[in-house]
Image: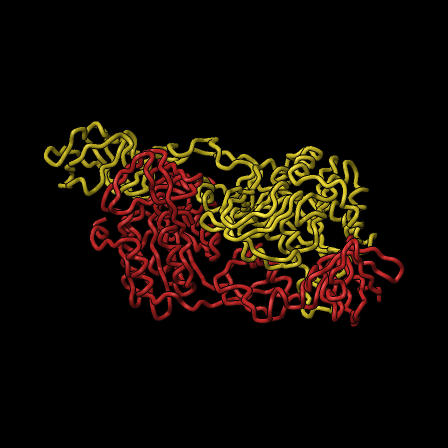
Chain colours: A red, B yellow
């Protein structure tokens, strides 16, 4: 414990310090994934449109393509008559041209012939043999989308870091983009601690606890578009731990240590991080509660980031949300995902001065209810959708007062 | 077009009518998936804890387990002395009992011996050989979590319909729950239309458009915890379409038709739905814009729901969000995912009376900016995070007025 008592810096200082020391943002490698596997992942580059869209001028209605100048002033009382020179069948290309006083039958989504600049809807016309009675004036561009109107060649489709999802997948599919370059940032999660056994352990041996933090971290990072891999559990033996960290750092850009909460694990982790290549251990404890024992280290030359998260599930969650996520976003050159707001406390909240505190809470309609829980609890976050943040200079806050809340 | 001019009902009526006619909610089948594949899926049942947690009384600190009664009144000026009778090694079971005036060294997360009811932190003690000087009084339960304190056997872990994610995965892992029963609701997406070719088509044939709606629908439904499968593109030929719908209905609980926008596709779809077993076609057109041509049908006996969505990408998106999603949630017995709020318009919005309108928009800090776009556009939703809803009786709204916005 004593190793963490001094040198505590604030959380914001820690994030700034690490970001500068490791020269964030890093240029991230990318890998190709098929569009069907890209959901929830982040584009690795600024993706420009290879083509313009639509590829041809298209009708947005069933009707007749015509020249708007021909029907200027047309109305129910003063219809204009045009000659129907044919039809563009659905899904077919046409070489037709619409001359003065002519029109062509077109379908919704179908191609518009050259020289036509608008489409009159069926219901505003009467057909009589090869003649069309048009009872409405039209603007140029009415009821059609011009070739290239929506998307120009080289228009920006996705910025580097954008999440691929339902809001942009249709656009990618439309343009025939069926593989996406996404971040190839490798994150490994190492669970530590003699008391930790795999979640799959059917019958819990006496004195043991199943690994929960690694699963939480994997799912949290995945929700934020970062793929992480659980690398298993390492016992609380210095050489084994050092070897596992070394191997994890060979195969991953980021290594997150988690799970164990004993002093010896923390001491071993701290020692291993101190021995990393420059700059090595950067942060040994953060002035926050829960989460004080957090460790952060990195190597500048081969671009590695290593975090040691506290073992208590709640502490681990709070540090993951308020330190790991902001660091990852900084590393990738993205804005922090933490959304700040103010909300009114619906119950007293007991805080202490001198430390930044985070309390799980339920935020709803501008009101926030802190959820009581001990740091060893695993289920507090199940119901919480926010953290109340009490700054270092804030103590106990009363029901009815406004407090800062974070969502992520 | 004319087939849709009469019999238009409002969107809310359509949802109510279909929900009643098809006897929603349905009892959904479930399937087992490994925990690592359960992220973003919905629990198929009310999941109860098989065990209590923690499985033994655990320390949340490094310190000494003791009886709080023994240190009542202890302070810096009046320390109490206890006999150290041993240590509980990390991750090990102990048969030790802490007698009166005794204490045992324990580690964070480690087991607490019988008869101890609290843990004094190391920093509040001084050790002198086998004697411990305790300088602080403790409450019963201080710095430990009692066996079963957090979760009792049969406590509700997940309600049917809850999404599995980072907020609850740690809890499941802790309790050794490594497979989850999730909804086994099969949704098939059939794309229709002669102008539609697969997104994978490298070079677009003249007059053709790549399929975007099926991708959008798949990703949208996945984000809401429903797995959908793209079943491919059917040409605009009545018998081929009827056969594809029949086959899709054999293999899926829900069939969503989408993509084509020609009159003949709509007519064929409507005819096919009319010929379904009871109750068959339920909704032929909804009084909304965009989205008027939407079709909804179902079979009560073998529990099938069929939707025909308009082909325009924006219309398809709006109906998917405001009709398909609410229906799916009703079908599963869940509350609608549409979140209503009020926001101030930052630009004039031109609406028309007599129809419920939805306009893509950017909502930020209580202000909402409508995004101009035609129904044929595919990229409007890329930037939109909300829809402005203008009720049937609302016309043009001015900058500075409050309007209703939906998010999903």
User: Which residue does the image show at 67% across and 39% down from the upper left?
Assistant: B10
Q: Please identify the quarter of the rendering in which residue A374 is found.
A: top left
| Residue nearest the observer in this picture, B47 or B59 | B47
Percent across and percent down for residue A169 are 59, 58
Furthest toward the front, the residue is: A77
User: Which residue does the image show at 45% across and 34% down from the upper left?
Assistant: B51
Q: Is residue B110 visible?
A: yes
Taking B389 as reference, is B127 left or right?
A: left
User: Which residue does the image show at 46% across and 32% down from the upper left?
Assistant: B155
| Residue nearest the observer in this picture, B190 or B61 | B190
Furthest toward the left, the residue is: B77
Taking B240 as reference, is A229 left or right?
A: left
Percent across and percent down for residue B290 are 66, 50
Q: Please identify the quarter of the rendering in which residue A66 is found.
A: bottom right
Furthest toward the right, the residue is: A129
Q: Is residue B324 visible?
A: no
| Residue nearest the observer in this picture, B51 or A208 | B51
Taking B90 as reference, is B339 left or right?
A: right
Percent across and percent down for residue B311 are 70, 54
Q: How many marks?
A: 0
Considering only vertical position in the picture, is B219 above or below B391?
below
Percent across and percent down for residue A76 are 78, 53
Q: Please identify the quarter of the rendering in which residue B207 is found.
A: bottom right
| Residue nearest the observer in this picture, A115 or A283 | A115
């Amino acid at each position: 414990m004593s190793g963490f008592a001094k040198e505590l810096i604030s959380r914001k200082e820690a994030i700034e310090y690490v970001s500068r020391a490791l020269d964030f943002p890093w240029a991230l490698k990318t890998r190709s994934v098929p569009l069907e596997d890209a959901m929830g992942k982040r584009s690795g580059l600024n993706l420009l449109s290879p083509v313009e869209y639509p590829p041809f001028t298209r009708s947005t209605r069933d009707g007749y393509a015509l020249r708007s100048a021909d029907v200027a002033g047309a109305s129910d009382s003063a219809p204009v008559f045009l000659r129907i020179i044919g039809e563009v069948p659905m899904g077919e290309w046409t070489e037709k041209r619409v001359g003065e006083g002519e029109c062509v039958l077109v379908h919704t989504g179908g191609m518009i012939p050259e020289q036509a600049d608008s489409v009159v809807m069926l219901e505003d016309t009467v057909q009589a043999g090869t003649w069309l009675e048009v009872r409405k004036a039209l603007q140029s561009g009415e009821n059609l989308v011009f070739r290239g109107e929506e998307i120009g060649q080289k228009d920006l489709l996705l910025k580097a870091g954008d999440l691929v999802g339902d809001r942009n997948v249709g656009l990618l599919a439309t343009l025939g983009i069926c593989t996406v370059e996404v971040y190839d940032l490798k994150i490994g999660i190492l669970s530590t601690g003699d008391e930790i056994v795999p979640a799959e352990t059917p019958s819990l041996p006496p004195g043991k606890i199943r690994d929960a933090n690694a699963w939480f971290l994997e799912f949290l990072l995945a929700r934020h578009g970062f793929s992480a891999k659980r690398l298993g559990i390492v016992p609380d033996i210095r050489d084994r731990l050092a070897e596992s960290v070394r191997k994890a750092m060979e195969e991953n850009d980021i290594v997150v240590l988690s799970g164990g909460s004993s002093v010896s694990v923390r001491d071993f982790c701290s020692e291993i991080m101190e021995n990393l290549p420059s700059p090595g251990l950067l942060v040994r404890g953060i002035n926050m509660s829960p989460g004080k024992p957090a460790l952060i280290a990195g190597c500048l030359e081969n671009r590695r980031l290593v975090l040691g998260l506290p073992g208590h599930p709640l502490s681990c969650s709070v540090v993951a949300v308020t330190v790991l996520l902001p660091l990852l976003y900084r590393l990738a050159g993205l804005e922090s995902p933490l959304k700040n707001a103010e909300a009114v406390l619906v119950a007293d909240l007991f805080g202490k001065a001198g430390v930044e505190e985070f309390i799980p809470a339920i935020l709803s309609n501008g009101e926030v209810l802190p959820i009581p829980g001990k740091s060893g609890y695993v289920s507090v976050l199940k119901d919480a959708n926010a953290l109340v943040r009490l700054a270092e200079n804030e103590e106990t806050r009363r029901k009815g007062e406004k407090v800062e809340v974070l969502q992520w």
